[in-house]
């Protein structure tokens, strides 16, 4: 099996998604892959205006610096839809990811569940390998 060349990682600003981004960036540094940080802009995204389509969020750039990833290997991608659909589409053009990474739970957390609805649905539906990074993961 060839190592992934493009890692797409879901990001919604939650602690779980930050840990997933950190994990994906560490892997990318080790294997020389590109990282595409993917944000799903849902139906009500315009009301919150949390993330720009054009600019990578400062928090993501800070994580890249912390993890030692070259910014030339880092991309920001925003797409319309629910998180699972957006991540599944990231395996095709224009992203063409060959590994999907998500946190175990995102902003819609339900106490007591090990996996959130997006990570569970993604693991069930994806034909591309999926890594679900638990909140308990800490980089070295």
Image (cartoon, rainbow, N blue to C red):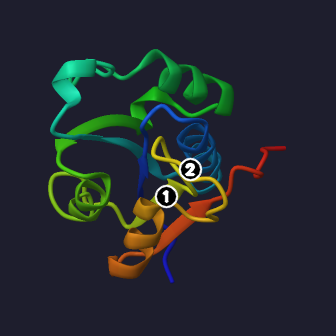
Please state the horizontal and vertical placement of residue 85, each as a whole percent of the image. 23, 61
Q: Residue at x 48, y 31 (%)?
A: 13
Q: Which residue is drawn at 40% across and 31% down?
A: 72
Q: Which residue is drawn at 26% across and 57% down?
A: 90
The C terminus lies in which quarter of the figure?
A: top right
Please state the horizontal and vertical placement of residue 22, each as a whole percent of the image. 62, 41
Please state the horizontal and vertical placement of residue 21, each as a whole percent of the image. 54, 42
Residue lying at the far front in this picture: please name it. Answer: 111
Q: Distance from label 1 to label 2 (Cα)?
A: 7 Å
Please state the horizontal and vertical placement of residue 2, each as a whole percent of the image. 49, 77
Along the viewing direction, whichever of 31 and 102 lies nearer the viewer: 102
Circle 1: is it few (<14), some (14-19), or many (20+) Cα within 10 Å? Answer: many
Decide if residue 52 is on the left or right side of residue 119.
left
Q: Is residue 59 placed above or below 89 in the rendered structure?
A: above
When asked about the image quadrant of residue 55, the answer is top left
Circle 2: is it few (<14), some (14-19), or many (20+) Cα within 10 Å? Answer: many
| Mark 1 or mark 2: whose residue is earlier in sequence | 2
Q: Residue 35 — which label?
A: none
Q: Residue at x 50, y 60 (%)?
A: 116
Q: Is residue 70 placed above or below 104 in the rendered structure?
A: above
Q: Is mark 1 on a helix, strand or loop?
A: strand
Q: Is mark 2 on a helix, strand or loop?
A: helix
Circle 2 sits on which residue? Answer: 24
Q: Is residue 120 placed above or below 81 in the rendered structure?
A: below
Q: For the residues labelled 1 and 2, say whether their Cβ atoms are less than 8 Å apart.
A: yes
Circle 1 sits on which residue? Answer: 101
Q: How many labels does the image show?
A: 2
Q: Is residue 82 placed above or below 84 in the rendered structure?
A: above
Give the number of the mark in front: 1 or 2: 1
């Amino acid at each position: 099996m060839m190592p992934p060349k493009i890692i797409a990682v879901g990001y919604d600003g939650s602690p779980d998604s930050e840990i997933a981004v950190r994990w994906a960036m560490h892997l990318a540094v080790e294997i020389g892959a590109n990282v595409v940080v993917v944000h799903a802009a849902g139906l009500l995204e315009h009301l919150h205006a949390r993330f720009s389509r054009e600019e990578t969020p400062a928090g993501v750039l800070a994580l890249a610096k912390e993890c030692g990833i070259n910014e030339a290997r880092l991309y920001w991608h925003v797409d319309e839809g629910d998180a699972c659909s957006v991540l599944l589409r990231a395996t095709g053009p224009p992203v063409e990811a060959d590994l999907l990474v998500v946190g175990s739970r995102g902003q819609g957390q339900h106490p007591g569940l090990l996996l959130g609805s997006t990570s569970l649905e993604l693991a069930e539906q994806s034909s591309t390998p999926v890594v679900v990074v638990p909140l308990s993961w800490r980089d070295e």
